[in-house]
Image (tube, grey):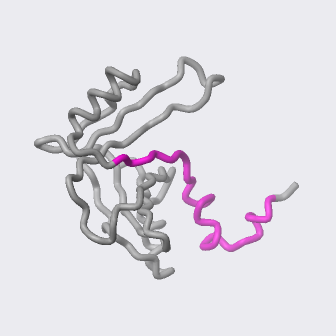
């Protein structure tokens, strides 16, 4: 059976064209070092990375021993003592398999509200953030 998405022009099939894969929730925390330690020591996650000096951003992960048991779980921890208006609603990180720059350009052409411009981060991702109509932040990223 042919997917109905295949009949649409490439510009319309952005999720397929740019290969979205994986979602990573971002949790606002008051102390990223303490939070990462808690997720590791109490919940059994392992520290994937910590960035900033002093640290302000981290990711913890739990990888199952085999694929049959499911996918890896990643949680991002973002130290933010206070967030400017509009109030914090939540953030989701969406990994893009190819051409994150092209996806950014396509969203800009569509008039999407870009909160953070396309940036190469020290933790090895190229990313940008948008705000959806209910106030949630969607961050799209691809590996450098």
Residue 125 relative to residue 106: left or right: left
Instruction: State the image coordinates of residue 26 (x, y, percent, origin top left).
Output: 38, 48
Which of the image's four quarters has the N terminus?
bottom right
Q: Residue furthest top?
A: 65
| Front position in the image: 25 or 105 | 25
Numbered marks: total: 0
| Front position in the image: 47 or 86 | 86
Residues drawn in magenta: 3-27
Please check the rendered image and state whether residue 2 is part of the magenta-colored stretch, yes or no: no
Instruction: State the image coordinates of residue 72 (x, y, percent, origin top left).
Output: 51, 31
Residue 70 position by quadrant:
top right
Residue 34 relative to residue 96: left or right: left
Q: Which residue appears at 49% of the width and 54% of the height?
A: 98
Is residue 112 positioned above or below 143 on the image? below
Is residue 31 positioned above or below 48 on the image? below
Q: Residue furthest left?
A: 54
| Front position in the image: 105 or 60 | 60
Residue 11 position by quadrant:
bottom right
Q: Which residue appears at 44% of the width and 52% of the height?
A: 93
Instruction: State the image coordinates of residue 27 (x, y, percent, origin top left).
Output: 36, 46
Q: Which residue appears at 74% of the width and 64% of the height?
A: 5
Please check the rendered image and state whether residue 20 is part of the magenta-colored stretch, yes or no: yes
Q: Which residue appears at 34% of the width and 49% of the height?
A: 125
Is residue 52 positioned above or below 82 on the image? above
């Amino acid at each position: 059976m042919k997917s109905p998405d295949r009949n649409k022009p490439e510009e319309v099939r952005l999720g397929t064209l740019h290969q979205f894969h994986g979602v990573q929730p971002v949790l606002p925390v008051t102390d990223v070092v303490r939070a990462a330690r808690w997720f590791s020591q109490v919940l059994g996650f392992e520290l994937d990375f910590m960035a900033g000096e002093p640290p302000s951003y981290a990711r913890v992960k739990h990888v199952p021993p085999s694929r049959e048991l499911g996918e890896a779980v990643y949680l991002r921890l973002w130290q933010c003592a206070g967030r400017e208006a509009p109030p914090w609603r939540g953030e989701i990180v969406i990994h893009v398999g190819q051409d994150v720059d092209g996806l950014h350009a396509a969203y800009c052409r569509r008039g999407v509200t870009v909160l953070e411009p396309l940036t190469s981060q020290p933790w090895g991702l190229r990313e940008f953030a948008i705000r959806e109509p209910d106030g949630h932040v969607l961050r799209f990223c691809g590996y450098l």
